[in-house]
Image: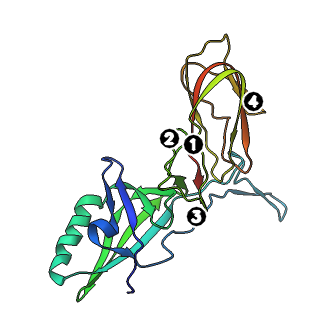
């Protein structure tokens, strides 16, 4: 194995504790094809008496729906032979069987979610390798930051990243906010406070919804699809738009 410098960050969701394969165990990623292909859920209906069929795969959602996908990362390192039993035990104790967020060093704008398993350990002299497997990862990788979180300059990729941070909006009359397009449709949450008008509403150009103080969510209102969405607020109040984009 060549000397590599590409690792990955592992955050245990239940505890928030973060590890890094290089910094904590000196183990680098040794393969390239570690993300499995997304498999779309499909549903076809044969039309009796014909050679035709109906593709109903997107009938319910109006968009593709994907199953879980597999992630399999080969990790390796050169270590003194006497250290390997301790390293493997430490890895298993800290992440094996845990639901985790995974952030690869070459894609620091996104994280994957799934249950991690440490498997297939092998050692030849000082060279040790193992598999970090997630048999059922969620199909989309998620933006590292949501629209409601503070923008992190240090981890932002100016080549591939999309700035979604919006902050708190003070609406007095009419206010328009553009939500950038993406890949994964998602339903935003509107966290509203200080309403000082008879009515406080939001519209996506097709539907108009009344907002109340507190958390508001409308399943028909979706963002981050193939096109930008302009949200128009009417009234007087304060609102935070909270959503997280994703990508295949």
Q: Are marks 2 and 3 in contact (CB under 8 Å)?
A: no
Say which residue label 3 marks.
38
Assign a secondary structure to mark 3. Answer: loop
Residue 222 coordinates in the image, percent (x, y): 66, 40
| Residue 243 drawn above or below residue 54 | above
Seen at 39% across and 70% down, the residue is 7
* Label 4 or label 1, whichever comes before in sequence order: 1
The label on residue 149 is 2
Seen at 56% across and 35% down, the residue is 167
Say which residue label 4 marks.
207
Q: Residue furthest top?
A: 198
Q: CA distance from mark 2 to mark 1?
A: 6 Å
Q: Are marks 2 and 1 in contact (CB under 8 Å)?
A: yes
To which quarter of the image does residue 204 belong?
top right
Residue 15 coordinates in the image, percent (x, y): 30, 47
* Label 2 or label 1, whichever comes before in sequence order: 2
Q: Residue furthest bottom?
A: 125
Assign a secondary structure to mark 4. Answer: loop
Residue 88 coordinates in the image, percent (x, y): 23, 71
Q: Nearer the viewer, mark 3 or mark 4?
A: 4
Q: CA distance from mark 4 to mark 2?
A: 26 Å
Q: Are marks 4 and 2 in contact (CB under 8 Å)?
A: no
Assign a secondary structure to mark 1. Answer: loop
């Amino acid at each position: 194995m060549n000397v590599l410098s590409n690792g990955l960050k592992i955050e245990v969701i239940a505890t928030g504790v973060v590890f890094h394969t290089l910094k904590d165990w000196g183990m680098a990623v040794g393969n390239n094809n570690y993300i499995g292909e997304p498999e779309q859920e499909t549903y076809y209906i044969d039309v009796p008496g014909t050679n035709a069929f109906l593709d109903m795969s997107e009938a319910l959602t109006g968009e593709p729906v994907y199953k879980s996908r597999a992630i399999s990362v080969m990790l390796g390192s050169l270590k003194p032979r006497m250290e390997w039993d301790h390293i493997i035990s430490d890895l298993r104790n800290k992440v094996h069987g845990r639901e985790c967020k995974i952030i690869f060093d070459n894609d620091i704008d996104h994280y994957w979610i799934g249950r991690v398993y440490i498997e297939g350990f092998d050692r030849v002299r000082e060279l040790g390798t193992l598999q970090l497997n997630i048999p059922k990862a969620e199909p989309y990788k998620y933006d590292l930051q949501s629209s409601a979180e503070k923008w992190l300059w240090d981890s932002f990729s100016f080549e591939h990243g999309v700035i979604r941070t919006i902050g708190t909006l003070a609406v007095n009359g009419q206010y328009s906010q553009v939500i950038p397009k993406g890949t994964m449709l998602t339903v935003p949450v509107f966290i509203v406070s200080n309403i000082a008008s008879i009515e406080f509403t939001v519209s996506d150009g097709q539907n108009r919804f009344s907002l109340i103080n507190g958390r508001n969510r409308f399943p028909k209102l979706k963002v981050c699809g193939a096109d930008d969405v302009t949200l128009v607020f009417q009234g007087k109040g304060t609102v935070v738009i909270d959503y997280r984009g994703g990508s295949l």
